[in-house]
Image (spheres, grey):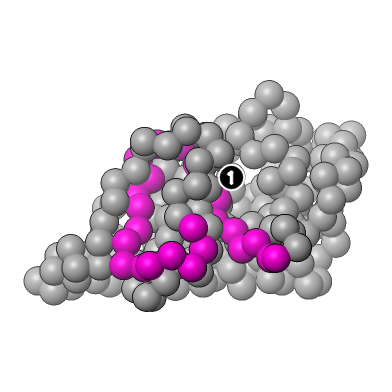
Amino acid sequence: MFKPGAQIVNQGERGGRAFILDQGWTYSSCTLRSGSRQIIDIQIPGDIANLQGLILPFAMQDVTAITRVEVYEVSFDIVGGATGPDPELAAFLLWLVASESAVTSTRLTDLGRRTAIERTAHLILELATRLKLAGLGTDTGFPCPMTQYLIADALGLTPVHVNRVLRELRLSRLASHHRGWLNLLDRDKLVVLAQFDGAYLQHPGSLDC
């Protein structure tokens, strides 16, 4: 178990382990010498934090708790031993790696080509889709413990800019973020604004995990 703000993984530390989130949210990030931070991805219950670090000899990213979290630690040796006789599990882990790569590619497109309001809308819809698939959200909203500072670091914006964008989304009756809950006021228009296609988040097989 980790408290909010706790560092679960430190960038550069020895690899060979990952964490399955049972409860709570975390984020993975890279921090420069200047102190600037870029959030690479956000993990919700059911996700695996530090998946790359499970395979690589060192952790490429920090993993930090957003809320109180409970995790199961798994090692490379244990996972390797389990996937050998279980090709479905091996295929599922391969899909997890591909899905994580797809999320990173999408975030790169956000930072490079989408406007501030488009990338914010895209992140909102991505989280909404992931949480709905995990049974933690609805068609009209989801719990969102992320602060404007965290959203800013995920989208390459300043907290002030994020505040303005969230206000614009609220006034446009598209989405609102209030007291840890994000309401999707008009999902269809939000999808058009973000040019969102959630196919990269869907598992193609029938494995129930």
- Closer to us: 147 or 125: 147
Q: Is residue 116 magenta?
A: no
Relative to residue 69, is residue 197 drawn left or right? right
Q: Residue at x 36, y 36 (%)?
A: 1
Q: Is residue 189 visible?
A: yes
Residue sticking out furthest to the front: 33
Q: Which residues are magenta?
A: 10-33
- Closer to us: 41 or 102: 41
Residue 97 percent coordinates (x, y): 41, 70
Residue density around tag 1, few if under 14, some if 14–19, many if 20 or more, within 10 Å: many
Residue sticking out furthest to the left: 85
Q: Is residue 12 magenta?
A: yes
Relative to residue 152, is residue 205 drawn left or right? left
Q: Is residue 192 visible?
A: no
Q: Residue at x 68, y 32 (%)?
A: 183
Vertical order, 69 against 161 (above or below)? above
- Closer to us: 98 or 69: 69
Residue 79 found in image quarter: bottom left
Q: Residue at x 83, y 34 (%)?
A: 170
Relative to residue 80, is residue 37 drawn left or right? right
Q: Assign a secondary structure to mark 1.
A: helix
Residue 66 found in image quarter: top right
Number of labels in the image equals 1
- Closer to us: 71 or 130: 71
Residue 108 percent coordinates (x, y): 68, 71
Amino acid type of the residue tagged 1 in the rendering: Ala
Give the labeled residue for mark 1.
128
Q: Residue at x 42, y 37 (%)?
A: 2
Vertical order, 25 against 20 (above or below)? above
